[in-house]
Amino acid sequence: MASHADTQQIREVAFETWTAAYRESLSIDFINNYLNKAFSISKIRQLIDGDIVLGKSSFLVAEESNQIIGYAQLIQLSEAKYDLYRIYIKPGSQKQGIGTKFLSEFIKIMKSEDALTVTVKKDNVIGRAFYSKNGFKEVEESTLTLEGKQLAIIKYELIIK
C-alpha cells in the first residue's frame, strides 16, 4: 500500500513513465504541464487518502532497494465492476513481472464474473501488449480530450474467472 511518504517517488515514476511512453506522440511541454497538474503532491496524496478512507480504491507500490519503481491503482466502480486506473513501471524495471504481480494482487480482491477494465492510449504499444498478454480483450475505441488535445484510446476488459 502506498503512503504519504511515497508521494515524491510516485510523482517521479509518473514523469519517467509518461515521458518514455508518449514522447513520440506528445510534446515534452504537454507531458510536463499535464503531469504537473494531475500528479501534483496534493493530488497524489488525495489518491492515496482515497485508498485509506474510502476503501473503494487500492493503491500499490513496487520497490527495489527502498526506491519505488512502479505503482498501480484499482478503483471499484460498482459491486462487480473495477477499473485499473493506472499501472506505471519505470522503463528499466519493465518486463520483470511487476505489472503482472499488481494484476494478481488486484484480482485477489475480486470475485468470479467481476469485470476489470483499463483504458490505454492507442499508441501505447507496450501497454496494449501487456494487457493483451494478460487476457484483456479490446472492447471499445474512442477519443479522449486531455488538456484540449484529442487522444485516441482503447478500452480493454477482463472478466475474472
Image (tube, helix red, strand yellow):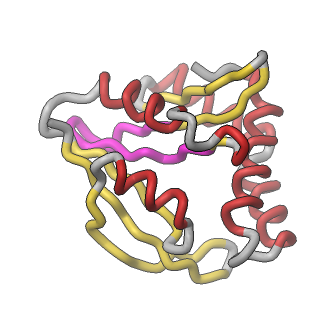
Query: In the rendered view, does 7 fall on the left or right side of 102?
Result: right
Query: In the rendered view, does 83 fall on the left or right side of 144?
Result: left
Quarter of the image with the N terminus in it: top right
Displayed quadrant of residue 40: top right
Q: Is residue 158 magenta?
A: no
Q: Find the residue positioned furthest to the front.
A: 96
**On screen, residue 158 above or below 129:** above
**On screen, residue 82 above or below 23:** above
Magenta span: chief secondary structure: strand
Displayed quadrant of residue 147: bottom right
Could you tell me residue 33's position as x and y percent?
A: 82, 65
**On screen, residue 159 above or below 145:** above
Q: Is residue 84 magenta?
A: yes
Question: Which residue lies at the image location 50% right of the left edge and 38% below the top edge?
Answer: 99
Question: Which residue lies at the image location 77% right of the left edge and 30% below the top edge?
Answer: 7
Question: Which residue lies at the image location 61% right of the left edge and 35% below the top edge?
Answer: 71
Query: In the rendered view, does 123 fall on the left or right side of 147?
Result: left
Question: Which residue lies at the image location 82% right of the left edge and 33% below the top edge?
Answer: 8
Q: Nearer the viewer, residue 143 or 28?
A: 28
Q: Nearer the viewer, residue 91 or 52?
A: 91
Q: Nearer the viewer, residue 73 or 43?
A: 73
Quarter of the image with the C terminus in it: top left
**On screen, residue 34 above or below 5:** below
Displayed quadrant of residue 111: top left
Query: In the rendered view, does 47 fall on the left or right side of 118?
Result: right
Could you tell me residue 90's position as x and y percent?
A: 70, 43
Segment tinted magenta in the rendering: 73-88
Could you tell me residue 26's position as x and y percent?
A: 73, 75
